[in-house]
Each structure stands twice: as C-alpha cells, then as structure tokens.
Image: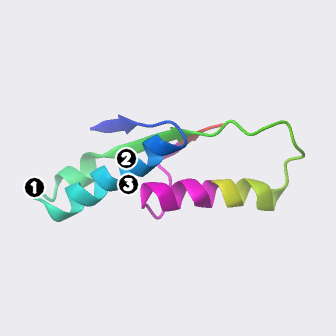
Amino acid sequence: MIVVVADGPAEDLYGMFINKVRREPPPEMLEEVRGLTKWVPSLVKMTRSFVEENINRSRKRMDVAALDMLQF
C-alpha cells in the first residue's frame, strides 16, 4: 500500500494514520505502507542544514525514522 501525501497538514494526517496501523492488527500491513511526500522550497540558497531541517520536519510530522520518498 502506498500513501501519497503533500507537505503540510497531509503529513500530520499520515502520522496519525501510520500510528493507527502500528497499533492495530494486522502488523504485516505496516511493512506494506509507504509514505511519499514533497517539498517545494522557496527560492533561497540551499544549504545542507536547510535541507536537513526541512527533511527532519517532515519526518517528525509523519512520525517516521526515514522518509520513503521525497519529491524535491
């Protein structure tokens, strides 16, 4: 199962969804879920810390250790 989300509130919804999947059977469903998100930065100088900060914000909102995919 693939769940596609956009940045912002959709990432929060994905976080709620993935937590529900973690709590409720069947546990193997968790292995099938992939969360995809996008990030459209404003026209600013891209620094490593700027990119990492925004990736970390998405990870926290989606409540995952790593993003399955980030459209950039």
Q: Is residue 66 visible?
A: no
Q: Is residue 71 left or right of residue 46?
A: left
Instruction: Tell us which disc is closer to us: 1 or 2.
Output: 2
Whether residue 54 is visible, yes or no, is yes
Q: CA distance from mark 2 to mark 3?
A: 5 Å
Secondary structure under the numbered disc 3 in the rendered image:
helix
Amino acid residing under circle 1: Pro
**Residue at image mark 3:** 15
Picture residue at 37% right of the left edge, 47% below the top: 13
Give residue 23's quadrant in the image. bottom left
**Marks 2 & 3, CB-CB < 8 Å contact:** yes
| Pointer 2 residue | 13
What residue sits 68% from the left and 36% below the top?
A: 40
| Residue range of the region highlighted in magenta in the rendering | 55-69
Q: Which one is in front, 11 or 32?
A: 11
**SS class, disc 1:** loop
Give the percent coordinates (x, y) of residue 38: 57, 37
What residue did someone put label 1 on? 26
Foreground tag (3 vs 1)? 3
- Mark 3: which amino acid? Gly
